[in-house]
Amino acid sequence: MSTETKTATLDATEFSLTPPDPVPQVAPEQAAGLVPVSTEEKSKLDTKVDAFVNELVSVDANSPAFGEKVDQITRMGQEQIRAAAAMSNRFLDRPVRAMDADGAVGKDLAELRRTVEDLDPGRKGKLSGPRKLLGIIPFGNKLKNYFDSYTSAQGHISSILQRLDSGKKELHLDNAAIDTERQKLWAAMGELEQMIHIAKTLDARLEAKALELDSSDPAKAKALRESALFYVRQRTQDLLTQMAVSVQGYLALDLVKKNNVELVKGVDRASTTTVGALRTAVTVAQAMTNQRLVLGQITALNKTTSDIIDSTSTLLREQTAQ
């Protein structure tokens, strides 16, 4: 193989592993509009906002009715915020195996790797020679001792593989639960998005109405700005903040699911490719060792045959000389 071909092969097989991207930070200002709201739904919400503004403007700014309307604004989206926050809390409380570096699946994979590395015949050196005590004194048979250790480790490997299979099933169940959680969180974010649209539309309508009343009813315009509009903007910020938290939670669930999928792939590789590679290596090592032993015996036999022929020739020469 030429140097160019070797270089091309190395370049083709080189690769690098990169960790998954972290969950991106979502600012409250960026959270609005991430969950789509249909035009028809927006139209219905706008109609409700217009009706509310008209009712608010129609009552006296000093009346209890005006105060009740403002109280409704202060409670706007409260139920949706609580529901979305509860879902985020459930997500944080649930056991996430993919985030736990010391989880059962991770431990079993690490243990299997150590076991396979320990049994790798390539790390044992020449197996056909005798073992040597302190590296000097012949002691025992390396090949027999190696295969004894390999045989005794089979039960341990089988136990690890069984635990990995159980862990894989749990990861599949975990991902199914994540899908359900994401669907619920998506629905909650949809309701939050509707409330954000209501809040922003209400802000625009109240601001426009206050400007309109500046000349005809300055007192009511002031009340709209200092009471209603103030609380609308406060609730808008609360809704946007909760939406940002919910969006990050949604993205985090997706990241956990991807990590679980990678763990499942790792378990599959460990159960098939890794263990199969070990068995192949052991078979090859045994075959090569047996081949060396057979070749050694054949060489010795050929030498014995040659010695017999030489001895017979010598006897014949001696007999002829007599």
Image: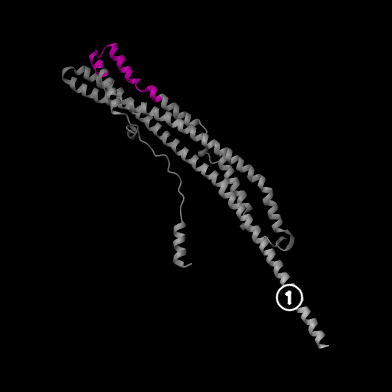
Q: Is residue 61 above or below residue 184?
A: above
Is there any visible trace of residue 125 in the rendered image? no
Give me the residue at 79% from left, 84% from top: 317
The vertical placement of 123 against 157, above or below, is below
Q: Which residue is mark 1?
A: 306
Q: Is residue 116 above or below residue 1?
A: above
Q: Position of residue 49 (x, y in %)?
A: 27, 21
234 displayed left or right of 181: left
In the picture as drawn, the residue positioned furthest to the left comes out as 215
As helix, strand or loop, the secondary structure at mark 1 comes to helix
Residue toward you, 232 or 307: 307
Is residue 35 a member of the stretch shown in magenta?
no
Indicate left or right for 212 with 134 as reference. Answer: left
Residue at the spot 49% in from the left edge and 33% down from the top edge: 176
Near-viewer residue (57 or 230): 57
Range of residues picked out in magenta:
52-81
Query: Residue drawn 30% across and 17% down?
Result: 70
Q: Residue furthest top?
A: 64
Q: Residue at x 49, y 41 (%)?
A: 261
Residue 305, horizontal then vertical, whole percent: 74, 73
Mark 1: amino acid: Ser
Q: In this orientation, does residue 182 appear? A: yes
Comparing 238 with 222, the one in front is 238
Say which quarter of the image contains residue 245: top left
Q: Predominant secondary structure in magenta?
A: helix
Q: Quadrant of residue 169?
A: top right
Q: Position of residue 243 (x, y in %)?
A: 37, 30
User: Where does residue 292 sit, x and y in percent of width and height?
Assistant: 67, 64
Frontmost residue, 252 versus 291: 291
- In the image: residue 86, left or right of residue 46: right
